[in-house]
Image (cartoon, helix red, strand yellow):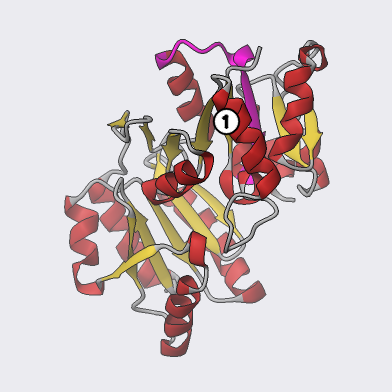
Amino acid sequence: MIKLIATDLDGTLFYPKNRITGIPATNKKFLRRYLDNGGKLILISGRNPRIVPKIERQLHHKVSLIGCNGGFYMDEDHKIHNPIPMNRDKLVELFAYIHHVFGPWLWMLFDTSDVLYTNCSNVPKGIDLGFRYGNLFRFYFAEKLIKGDANFVNRLATKDNFKAMIAFGVKQDGKTKAEQACLALKARFGDYFEFATSLNVIEVTAKGVQKGNGLVSYCKANDIDINEVAVCGDSGNDLYMFARFPHTFAMEHSPEHFKSQANHVISRISGLQEYLDNPSLLENDKIKEINYEKALDN
């Protein structure tokens, strides 16, 4: 019996994405009914806690969050547990190295508050303005940005930070530079951080921080068996959850090889209803051996 739905956000819970309405109506209706009947929902995301109250207002229920890809867990009372911040000294060292060698356009820094701290010292002025105005027009998904280049390094050195995003250029040039920089960072700082690329962005978290590890810790703390969890995702670091749980669901719009890493494929989160109504469909689910390299390349 499924007691917990663990879901990624942007390509999963929010799919198809609408910057005005947030959660699609069919997903909202399904999850309200599921939560009304005593089910639990945990959001597994690279985001900080800012998104949680918006989701709770739409679902009329409290939910939990594993934020910053596993950097911390926030319970239904919005209390933070199991924080795993990045090493401050090494983060400052990384910041200096990557600016000297690769010159990224933008840094975004995440903690357990509802704001993002940014450093835009290398962004062309027009693009900087476009980024900020563009954020305003994301509406439901808009972030609360705090720009403070002069204080940014001090924040790296003196505060607990749980994720950084480092952006390089635009289009193929930015993607290529991000991939090159990520390889260099893994070689130089791989003992201290986890690194992953998505298009022109590198995501950085503390060593060992992954969505799968965070979800396993949450389940142990809340006495939930892995066979009582439905795990939903669409790409990238969702694979780390698929590697730890049997009842895995990939989104239909995901890359083909990613879908092959899951035991089931659904077009929307609301597609889980069929499996809740027919538990026999889950009886043969086993934890798969994940091909990370091939899946992450798609």
Residue 125 picture quarter: bottom left
261 left or right, relative to 170: right
Is 188 one of the magenta-colored residues? no
215 left or right, relative to 18: left
At 38% from the left edge and 46% from the top edge, which residue is drawn? 49
At 59% from the left edge and 51% from the top edge, which residue is drawn? 10
At 67% from the left edge and 48% from the top edge, which residue is drawn? 25
Toward the bottom, the furthest residue is: 126
Residue 234 picture quarter: top right
Q: Which residue is mark 1?
A: 6
270 left or right, relative to 238: right
Question: 178 or 188, which is in the foreground?
Answer: 178
Residue 77 picture quarter: top left
At 48% from the left edge and 82% from the top edge, which residue is drawn? 130
Q: How many marks?
A: 1
Q: Secondary structure at mark 1?
A: strand
Q: Position of residue 146 (x, y in %)?
A: 29, 67
What segment is highlighted magenta in the picture? 221-236
Question: 188 or 291, which is in the foreground?
Answer: 291
Q: Name the kind of residue labelled 1 in the image.
A: Ala
Q: Residues within 10 Å of mark 1 (few under 14, many from 20)?
A: many
Q: Position of residue 220 (x, y in %)?
A: 45, 14
Q: Position of residue 57 (x, y in %)?
A: 46, 45
Query: Measured along the vertical axis of the image, is residue 99 above or below residue 283?
Result: below
